[in-house]
Amino acid sequence: MEITLDSIIGILGLLLGGGTIGSIFTWRFQRKKAKAEATQAEVEAAKDKQEYYRGIIDDVIKDRDYYKQERDEVRERMDKMAHSFMDWRMEADKDRMDMKMQIAKLGRKVEAMAPFLCGDLQCKWRKHVVLSEDGTVKQERKPKKQTSDIEPINNEIL
């Protein structure tokens, strides 16, 4: 078997024309193209993922700012309420002290008037009475006259 130039050209033509070498080049080109497209798709996916996480971070920051503002408003309301309560308490304590002073003053006036009170409304001589805590008037008991075995001296006989 002798290989001639025509047979070599025929084999080369068959290989080149039949697509074997062309298909090898095409196959390599398509592999590089697919690899580049895969890399591009990974880059796009990474960009999409980065944008998604950036959106989540922005939402978290907005939520944080909202809750900070709400917390500050609640603190402000609590401070106002605490100040209001303290002012009310100071005013109530002052009013209570004023009432205690007035009650004590009225008590002293009633004590001073006690000798001038009478339990008998028809009496003009003002018999001393005792005032109870609930405001009722009690007359002092008069001591009973002691009877003795001795009769009083009769000055008429003398």
Image: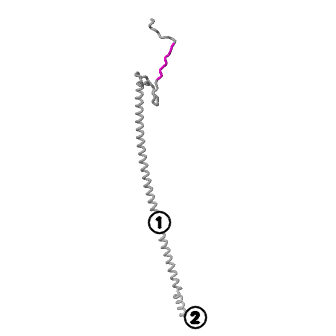
Q: Position of residue 75 (x, y in %)?
A: 43, 51
Q: Position of residue 42 (x, y in %)?
A: 49, 71
Residue reaching furthest to the top = 158
Q: Is residue 64 above or below residue 91?
A: below
Q: Position of residue 8 (x, y in %)?
A: 54, 91
First reached walking from the N terminus: tag 2 or tag 1: 2
Residue at image mark 1 = 52
Tell me the amino acid under the disc marked 1: Tyr
Q: Would you call the spot at circle 1 few (<14 residues within 10 Å), some (14-19), or many (20 or more)?
A: few
Q: Is 116 inside the magenta-drawn segment?
A: no
* Quadrant assignment for the C terminus: top left
Q: How many marks?
A: 2
Of residues 127 and 74, which is closer to you in this image? 127
Q: Residue at x 42, y 50 (%)?
A: 77
Tell me the amino acid under the disc marked 2: Glu
Residue at image mark 2 = 2
Q: Position of residue 84 (x, y in %)?
A: 41, 45
Q: Quadrant of residue 113?
A: top left
Q: Residue at x 50, y 15 (%)?
A: 147
* Quadrant assignment for the N terminus: bottom right
Q: Residue at x 47, y 20 (%)?
A: 142
Residue reaching furthest to the front = 122
- For residue 117, the mark is none
Q: Which residues are magenta?
A: 140-148
Q: Is residue 74 above or below residue 11?
A: above
Which one is in front in this view, the residue at disc 2 or the one at disc 1? 1
Q: Is residue 125 above or below residue 50?
A: above
Q: CA distance from mark 2 to mark 1?
A: 70 Å
